[in-house]
Image (cartoon, grey):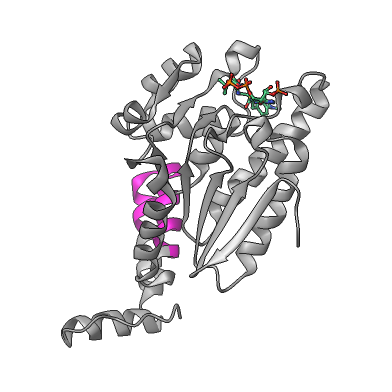
């Protein structure tokens, strides 16, 4: 299906999703969020897509936030619907059984920073800038920022960033653990594909179970999390990939995973 503001390209097992409104620094309006939601459904259902990369079009922005011109005149009820829909779309990314990597190629502000945080891994280019500037607009982060930022960088740093609305550069984002790696802008997609490809050489059921177990660690007490992990671990032993992975090790050869 063709969309106006979001593009998807499937290449070598990776679905590259591009938010494509460069004129508005890829700001998320309702239409864009809806398209993103539909594309995520497509990618979820497509068995050829083993991993996902999300990026922004152009050289300036990943996503410069929710669309301020659209939000400006929203009534409280509309704002609630908009916020809940955005939260639902981003949660879909977090709960997707496939690994999702954000390739942050410029401004990741407000909803853009929140989109990146809903992904499993964030790789940034040197020119990337992160921030939650919402309080400067008289609102608070509304697409999960108050929940995910403290989980990623700790409560104190999250409060500082959200209260001040300060923008930080890629190096500072790396230092506080908001991103995993910083690379040259012209190498960003290449480096991100490399990580996706590396993940795809592993047992994809194991990756998906690991994602679920790690996600569960965040919201549960450790004993519940341990029990979750033990069950997920047991499920691995029902897969062909587990038999193949262990046999390959013992036979001193590379494994051939089939994702079953
Ligand atoms: N929305 C709409 N348009 C945007 C935009 C945005 N977030 N960011 C940039 N643009 C547009 C600009 O208006 C400009 O359009 P024209 O004037 O050319 O028509 C074009 O993109 C280029 O931007 P600039 O000319 O400003 O470019 P500069 O290089 O000078 O500056 C900048 C780049 C990123 C520093 C600047 O554009 C900027 O500060 N942008 C706004 C960043 C921001 O404040 N982002 C956070 C948005 S608030 C909620 C739901 C969601 C949210 C909150 C609550 N609930 C309902 C509960 C989320 C909120 C946000 O994300």
Q: Is residue 219 magenta?
A: yes
177 w.r.t. 254: above or below: above
Which residue lies at the image location 32% right of the left edge and 29% below the top edge? Answer: 171
Q: Which residues are magenta?
A: 208-227
20 w.r.t. 164: above or below: below
Find ligand 1 in the image and state its quadrant. Answer: top right
x and y percentages locating residue 2 in the rendered image: 76, 58
Q: Is residue 72 magenta?
A: no
Q: Quadrant of the image for the C terminus?
A: bottom left
Which residue lies at the image location 44% right of the left edge and 32% below the top edge? Answer: 128
Which residue lies at the image location 49% right of the left edge and 13% below the top edge? Answer: 163
Observer-nearest of 19 and 211: 19
x and y percentages locating residue 125 in the rendered image: 40, 38
Q: Quadrant of residue 201?
A: bottom left
257 w.r.t. 190: above or below: below
Which residue lies at the image location 37% right of the left edge and 38% below the top edge? Answer: 179
Count of numbered badges drawn on the protein: 0
Q: Main secondary structure of the magenta part?
A: helix
Observer-nearest of 243 and 58: 58
Q: Quadrant of the image for the N terminus?
A: bottom right
Q: Is residue 142 left or right of residue 177?
A: right
x and y percentages locating residue 145 in the rendered image: 54, 30
x and y percentages locating residue 54 in the rendered image: 54, 49
């Amino acid at each position: 299906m063709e969309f106006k503001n979001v593009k998807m390209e499937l290449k070598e097992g990776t679905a590259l999703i591009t938010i494509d409104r460069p004129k508005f620094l890829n700001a998320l309006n309702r239409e864009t969020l809806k398209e993103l939601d539909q594309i995520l459904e497509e990618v979820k259902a497509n068995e050829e897509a083993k991993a996902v990369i999300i990026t922004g079009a152009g050289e300036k922005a990943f996503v410069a936030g929710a669309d301020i011109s659209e939000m400006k005149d929203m009534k409280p009820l509309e704002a609630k619907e908009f916020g809940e829909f955005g939260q639902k779309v981003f949660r879909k990314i977090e709960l997707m059984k496939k690994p999702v990597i954000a390739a942050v190629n410029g401004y990741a502000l407000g909803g853009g920073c929140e989109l990146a945080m809903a992904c499993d891994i964030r790789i940034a280019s040197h020119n990337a800038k992160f921030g939650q500037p919402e309080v400067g607009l008289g609102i608070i982060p509304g697409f999960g920022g108050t929940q995910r930022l403290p989980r990623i960088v700790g409560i104190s740093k999250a409060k500082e960033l959200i209260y001040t609305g300060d923008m930080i550069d890629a190096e500072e984002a790396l230092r506080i653990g908001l991103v995993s790696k910083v690379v040259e802008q012209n190498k960003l997609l290449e480096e991100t594909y490399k990580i996706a490809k590396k993940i795809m050489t592993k047992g994809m059921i194991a990756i998906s179970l690991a994602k679920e177990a790690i996600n569960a660690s965040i919201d549960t007490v450790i004993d519940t999390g341990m029990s979750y992990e033990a069950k997920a671990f047991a499920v691995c032993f029902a897969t062909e990939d587990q038999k193949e992975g262990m046999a390959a090790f013992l036979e001193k050869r590379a494994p051939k995973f089939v994702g079953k």
